[in-house]
Image: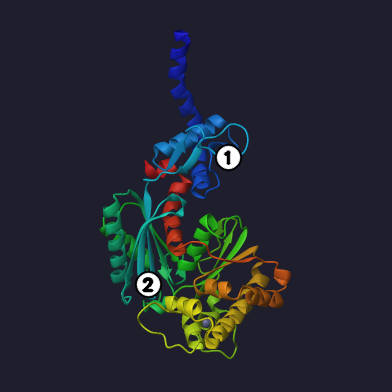
Amino acid sequence: MSGKADPRAAGEGTTSRTRLDRGRGALGPALELVHTGRAPTRAVLTAELGVTRATAGAVAAELEALGLIRVDARPGAAAGSQGRPSHRLSIAEDGPVALAAQVHADGFRAALVGLGGRIVATAPGCEVVDADPAKVLASVVETGAELLRETGRRCVGAGLAVPSAVAEPEGLALNPLHLAWPAGAPVRRIFAEQVRAAGIAGPAFAANDVNLAALAEHRHGAGRGARDLLCVATGHRGVGGALVLDGRLHSGSSGLALEVGHLTVNPDGRPCYCGGHGCLDVEADPLAFLRAAGREPGPEVSLLQQSYDLIRDHYADPAVRTATETLVDRLGLGLAGLVNILNPDRIILGGLHRALLDAAPERLRAVVADRSLWGQSGGVPILPCGLDHNSLVGAAELAWQPVLDDPLGALT
Ligand SMILES: [Zn+2]
């Protein structure tokens, strides 16, 4: 018997390496399945990848060796509905993180985000956003570097969310008007320089905040499983939109698609900085809501927070209710136009628009149904965004992408 045992033990390593050679191409897809919660067990992973059990086992073991996931083989740990219990797969609790940063009209926030879209640590910074992007980005990167020092986590890279269209391939913030940054500021280059200067390893990325929110929601939140996902959201000022098609952001030929803020929803409305009148951007954002409710926006907390507070605490006030309905009607008109053009299978709303949906869901669905061909009879589900800080989680997705594409190449 011992004569058989030795060659088998020697062969085990060779076989497993051969299996991994065959399975190396499956490492990225496997990690993405665990990352997005679609492979909770090794049995599901095997089925989803369409490989042998042995290959799936080698792939899972390699991802565990890279410190990315945990393979739990304890009996009874698995939740297989039939047959033998399978090893449970989860994100490694102490694995690497991405540094995520978000700048908005009222300040910034930094976070460390692990696989699975998990926010490991986060810190806000509230300040008057400086007109010089380099100063703001230095502050937010320093806040992130401090979080990395505190947690001692390995960093795979950094992502930045900005409230502006970001032109590709240069990474220029074209219209950061609510920030008073110069139009066309090279935010990706500046962010990358700050990240390097802070001694943080890995590549650096930047993109529009609503695009990133949509990406995060598609992978981890209310957009999971949607094919053509439309996301419309307010940040602290203005209105943004994004479309995720077959799991990828539709960003247009140069990154500027889905500039939904300049749809006209009130022809007699207030002038917009784009030169038009009554755009969604100036008719359905937190500032428009506060004004419609007859409230003078105060400087204490963000416009978004003041709007949330008003809807939550003062909805019985007729002025607040009327303002809510006015904004719901304007938003519904904008969504109806988008439904006709894009034919999404799901719409998710974020920021103030989420609060409007929560306050008057039937009214919003009725406006969209009345005004759109494809939205009739409530044909398109309209749901609230589900993640806290989805733009930050999306910014982290950018930094995670090289690891998801090639775990071995990115981490060794
Ligand atoms: Zn406009």
> In this rendering, does residue 142 appear at all?
yes
Quadrant of residue 79 in the image? top right
**Is residue 106 placed above or below 192 in the rendered structure?**
below
* Residue on which the image places disc 2: 185
| Labels 1, 2: front one | 1
**Mark 1: few/some/many CA within 10 Å (<14, 14-19, 20+):** some
Residue 193 horizontal side relative to residue 246, left or right: left
**Is residue 108 placed above or below 54 in the rendered structure?**
below
Residue 348 picture location, percent across and down? 57, 66
Per the rendering, the mark at residue 33 is: none
**Is residue 30 placed above or below 232 in the rendered structure?**
above
The amino acid sitting under disc 1 is Val
- Taking the spot 57% from the left edge, 60% from the top edge, the residue there is 223
Quadrant of residue 98 in the image? bottom left
**Is residue 177 placed above or below 211 in the rendered structure?**
below
The amino acid sitting under disc 2 is Ala
Element under label 2? Answer: loop
* Residue on which the image places disc 1: 44
